[in-house]
Image: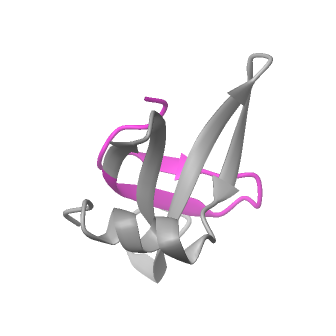
Amino acid sequence: MFFTKNEVVELDDEKKFVVIDVTLLNNEVYYQVQEVNSEGVNVVGEKKVIMAVNENSTLYIEDVMDENKLLSLKGIFTG
């Protein structure tokens, strides 16, 4: 896993997100995150699901948009 629960991460759009939950589904790691302010303290956005993909030693973050996958993950995430 690349991120841990409660970790604040900054994504490429310079927004910060707190990791609410982490789960493994079909050998892929998914993260439920929520945007926080620049200090990483106050919640300022909606929850979303991302996944981290490691290609050639470069970490890419992708938003999960597939409705079927999101429904499957909704029952797994605890946050």
For the question of whether residue 35 can be seen, the reply is: no
Q: How many marks?
A: 0
Vertical position of residue 55 compared to residue 6: above or below: above
Any magenta on residue 11? yes
Q: Residue furthest left?
A: 78
- Image coordinates for residue 11, horizontal then vertical, percent: 67, 52
- Image coordinates for residue 1, horizontal then vertical, percent: 43, 29
Direction from residue 79 to residue 2 in the image, left or right:
right
The residue drawn where x is 50% and y is 72% is 68
Location of residue 57 by image quarter: top right
Direction from residue 27 to residue 50 in the image, left or right:
right
Residue extent of the magenta highlight: 1-21
For the question of whether residue 24 can be seen, the reply is: yes
Any magenta on residue 15? yes
Direction from residue 75 to residue 43 in the image, left or right:
right
Vertical position of residue 41 compared to residue 30: above or below: below
Location of residue 15 by image quarter: bottom right
- Image coordinates for residue 77, horizontal then vertical, percent: 26, 61
Which quadrant holds the C terminus?
Answer: bottom left
The residue drawn where x is 67% and y is 47% is 61
- Image coordinates for residue 25, horizontal then vertical, percent: 39, 45
Indicate the colouring scheme.
one colour
The residue drawn where x is 56% and y is 60% is 16
Q: Nearer the viewer, residue 75 or 59?
A: 75
Vertical position of residue 1 compared to residue 4: above or below: above
Q: Nearer the viewer, residue 29 or 18?
A: 29
